[in-house]
Image: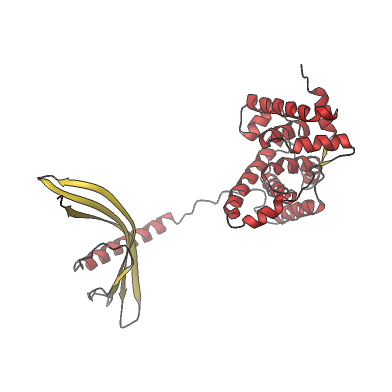
Amino acid sequence: MNDFSELETELKKLRPMAVSDPLCARIERELAQSAITPTAGLLLRPAKRRQGGWTLGLGLAAAAALVVVALNFHSTPPAKPPVLAQQETPAPAVPVASGFQASALTQVVYGQRDEGLVFLPNQSERVLRRVRYDTRETMQWRDPQTGASLRVSYPAEQVVLTPVSFQ
Amino acid sequence: MERTRTHEDWKTCFAQMGPALVLFARRWTNCRAEAEDVVQEAFVRFWRRQHAIENRALLYATVRSAALDRLRSEQRRARREATAAQDGADHYEPQFTSENEGEQLLANAVERLPDEQREVVVLKIWSEFTFAEIGNILEISQNTAASRYRYALGALRKTLQPHE
């Protein structure tokens, strides 16, 4: 049935090279290391953390603070044209109850997608080019009295419609 | 049936399986030292997780997994270290101990087999796995393993014919 039996016998006579002594020593060292480690050999999955509620609360509080701050900041929004570079503008000083004043606004455009031509619903002859920008905006506040500063950064997306005229 | 094992068991186990494991790991590595590193990582990982000693196929699969992990990171690194890889390519390391010219020819022929055939031969001849086990280790079908084995032995026979 097996016409390779003679060749297999010859192959079995070949012996793979023995492993080096340093390899055995390295394995011994690693296993000995794990033997003195309390969790050695088990590699238990870490238990689920029990401070989930605490973390969630903190996260929600941070998110709420962010929303309040963002709304406050955008109450006097500077008109921002889309740029493909980092832009730093001194933000208008809007006094906040805590004494923080807006000190800088940074907008970094890291992505641009040309989505082609679109037609406005009620103006069929009006053609616009729609370009979508992926940006990251960073706002900074500073309390001049204490020197404390607050910084908020978030991703944003902007869609710009540019009229297109055909000759 | 899994038997209780002691910390010293690994030496017995490794003495029996080490050479074949390194031979198996050579499939994905540039040199013997790298193959030994892979075997070390896999063997320690296997032993720490307290798998049954008899589960040899899992040990080989662990070696394969460790080798592939290493290969992926090596490929990323290779783009930056192309020169070093070139230096290693010129270096030849025998994988078998041969006592006569016939064995030397056979060993050379085995080393020249395509990787996917050689790994099946290594697992079949020097680790004595069944084709079903080889299929599990290499994540291929049993028939594919058997077919690669036949092609490999056919190629070896053809290579050796003029010398016989």
**Image-quadrant location for residue B22:** top right
Residue B144 quadrant: top right
Q: Is residue B130 left or right of residue B104?
A: left
Q: Position of residue A111 (x, y in %)?
A: 34, 56
Q: Position of residue A86 (x, y in %)?
A: 33, 67
- The extreme front residue here reads A167
Query: Where is residue A68 drawn, in percent x and y?
Result: 25, 64
Residue A67 in picture, x, y percent from top left: 27, 62
Q: Nearer the viewer, residue B121 or B36?
A: B121
The residue positioned farthest toward the left in the image shown: A122
Is residue A34 among the parts visible in the rendering?
A: no
Q: Is residue A162 left or right of residue B101?
A: left
Front residue of B18 and A1: A1
Count all numbered tags in the image, as a single digit: 0
- Horizontal relation, residue B56 to residue A156: left or right: right
Q: Is residue B104 left or right of residue B128?
A: right
Image vertical order of residue A87 relative to residue A30, above or below:
below
For image coordinates 76% across by 30% down, the residue present is B156
- The residue sitting at 34% across, 75% down in the picture is A149
The C terminus of chain B appears in which quarter of the rendering?
top right
**Is residue B128 placed above or below A78 in the rendered structure?**
above
